[in-house]
Image: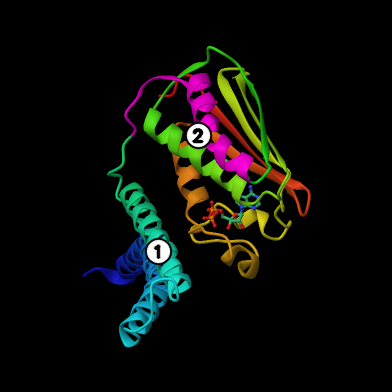
Amino acid sequence: VLGIGGLVSIGIALFAGLFLAKRALIPIQQSWEKQQQFIADASHELRTPLSVILVNLERLFRSPGRTIEEESEHILVSIQETRRLNKLVSDLLTLARTDSNELQLLKQTVPMGELVEKSVQTFRQLATVRGISIETDIQQPLEMSGDQERLQQLLVIMLDNALKYSYEQGVIAVSCKRDGHGISLIVKDSGIGISQEDIPYVFDRFYRADKMRSRKLEGTGLGLSIAKWIVDAHGGKIRVESEEGKGTSFIVWLPVKSG
Ligand code: ADP
């Protein structure tokens, strides 16, 4: 009853339907694969400090005669690894909440100039101990609409990295100024820098440039992906400029009024 023409039309419609359905499924599959990769990476990162803590505790358990002084190095390592674990879990929770769209910004008027000044103050002592100086060029008053807690978290991530990857006696320059409809925030250090091959990946989850070298420094490889989420959520932009052995600048632009 359909005839050849009808059958061909049904065939074409079926083929087009299947093709479109497959295309629609690709993003879902990619997002699922990304989640699987995230879980695999997270498990791997969690296992490393856990194994170190376990080995150290077993060692202490097997040598009851030894004093705390004699075992102080193993105890210290366990404390450091527990700290790392703590940071890792809290960063992972933040990212999991951003993935499920649970983390929403709480918008208010943020005194950005003051916030930057205060954040720098909290890092000054740590910097001084290592002979590092922090220079500031902060416009006051400088206000924007945003989530104060998240913006502070962004500053902590940027300043913590600048300090962590600085050489002793280095200089960190922090500037925060009005720039068009927004605020430009720059944290520049004179530290180890990032190689050109590593630059495209620094905002990726768990990415740590030059693993051997970074391993000696505490970190989770999640800070910059959280920083990027915070900037994107405010409708801003973040980028990095760096030269190996010379230093790095993280350059952020945030709109004063975000939607
Ligand atoms: P981490 O916890 O390892 O610091 P981040 O996500 O904050 O994780 O940074 C990712 C990687 O980018 C770091 O491991 C480091 O290799 C590189 N990086 C970040 N900030 C700097 C900086 N200021 N100077 C040099 N390298 C940096």
Residue 56 versus residue 197 in the image, above or below: below
Q: Nearer the viewer, residue 33 or 216?
A: 216
Q: Which of 183 and 86 is in front in this view?
A: 86
Left or right side of 248 for 238: left
Q: What stretch is highlighted in magenta?
A: 105-129
- Residue 232 seen in render: no
Give the labeled residue for mark 2: 122
Q: Nearer the viewer, residue 20 or 202?
A: 202
- Residue 184 pos. (x, y %): 61, 26
Q: The C terminus appears in which quarter of the rendering?
A: top left
Hey, what amino acid is under mark 2?
Answer: Thr
Left or right side of 1 for 152: right
Residue 93 versus residue 156 in the image, above or below: below
Q: Between disc 1 and disc 2, whose residue precedes?
A: 1
Give the labeled residue for mark 1: 79
Queried on whether the Cβ of the residue with tag 1 lies below 8 angstroms from ligand 1, the answer reads no
State yes or no: residue 111 in magenta.
Answer: yes
From this viewpoint, which residue is outermost toward the bottom? 62
The residues bearing labels 1 and 2 have C-alpha atoms spaced at a distance of 23 Å
